[in-house]
Image (cartoon, rainbow, N blue to C red):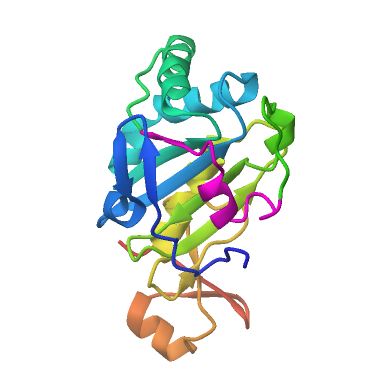
Amino acid sequence: MALRINDTLPNLTVQTDQGSFALHDFIGDSWMILFSHPKDFTPVCTTEFGAVAQLAEEWEKRNTKVIGLSVDGVDEHVQWKADIESFAGAKAGFPIIADKDLTVSKAFDMLPADAYLPDGRTAADSASVRVVFIVSPDKKVQLMMTYPMSVGRNFAEVLRALDALQATYQTPIATPANWVHGQDVIVALSLDDAAAREKFGEIDAKLPYLRTTKMPA
C-alpha cells in the first residue's frame, strides 16, 4: 500500500554508515527529512548530498535530523562521502541508509514491490528512488516530493516547506503561495472571524474565505 501524507512512517530498522537503528528512535522528538537516491557515485546526487551538508546549521536551528538513503552498501557510502565532502567543502555528518536489498525503497513505495533490478544495476534501474520525505515528531509523514533523475532538488525549497510545516503544525493556519518564514499566514476556515480574532488578534479579510494574519510567534 502506498505511503501517504499523515501515515505513520514505518518503523524499520535500517543499516547506515553510522550504525543500525530503528527510524522512530532516530527521529525521537525531532523533525526528520529523509532524502533518497538511486545510486552512489552519481553526479546529481553528489551535488544534492553536498547541498544538504552545507545546510547543517539550518537543520539544527529547526530541530530537524536529516538522513540519506541510497541503494548501495555501507562501504560504498563511506567512500562516496569523501567525494561529497570534497565537492561541497562541508562535512556530511548525517547517516546514509544502505538499502541494497531495497527494503526501505519498497516499504516507502519508491519502487513497485515486484520491481526487477538486475545485478550490476545502474542508477537508471532504480531511478524512481528520488524522494524527499518530511516527518513530524509524532512520526507522521507530512510531505513528499518526487523528482526525476535529470532535475536536482532545490533544498532552499525543502527548507521553505519545512518552515511552513513547522509554522502550521497543530495550528489552524496555512501558508499562501511562495510564502517564506515571517510573512503573513492564512487563517484556517475552521475558525469563524470571531474565533480567529480571539486566537490571533487582527485579521485581514482579503475575501470572505481568504483571511490573513501575522505569523504567530
Question: Where does residue 142 sit, x and y in percent of width and height?
Answer: 49, 61
Front residue of 167/54: it is 54
Camera sees residue 60: yes
| Secondary structure character of the magenta stretch overall | loop
**Which segment is the magenta one?**
95-114
Query: Residue shown at 36%/75% (left/top)?
Result: 200
User: Considering only vertical position in the picture, is 215 above or below 154?
Assistant: below
Horizontal side, residue 201 vs residue 77: left or right: left
User: Considering only vertical position in the picture, is 203 above or below 65?
Assistant: below
Query: Residue shown at 42%/21% (left/top)?
Result: 75
- Tell whether position 96 is magenta: yes
Quadrant position of the N terminus in the picture:
bottom right
Quadrant position of the C terminus in the picture:
bottom left
Task: State the image quarter where residue 52 is shown.
Answer: top left
- For this orientation, the residue located farthest to the top is 86
Front residue of 138/62: it is 138
Camera sees residue 214: no
Question: Where does residue 31 sit, x and y in percent of width and height?
Answer: 35, 53
Front residue of 55/193: it is 55
Horizontal side, residue 200 vs residue 173: left or right: left
- For this orientation, the residue located farthest to the front is 119
Query: Residue shown at 38%/72% (left/top)?
Result: 170
Question: Where does residue 195 sit, x and y in percent of width and height?
Answer: 40, 88
Question: Where does residue 192 sit, x and y in percent of width and height?
Answer: 49, 89
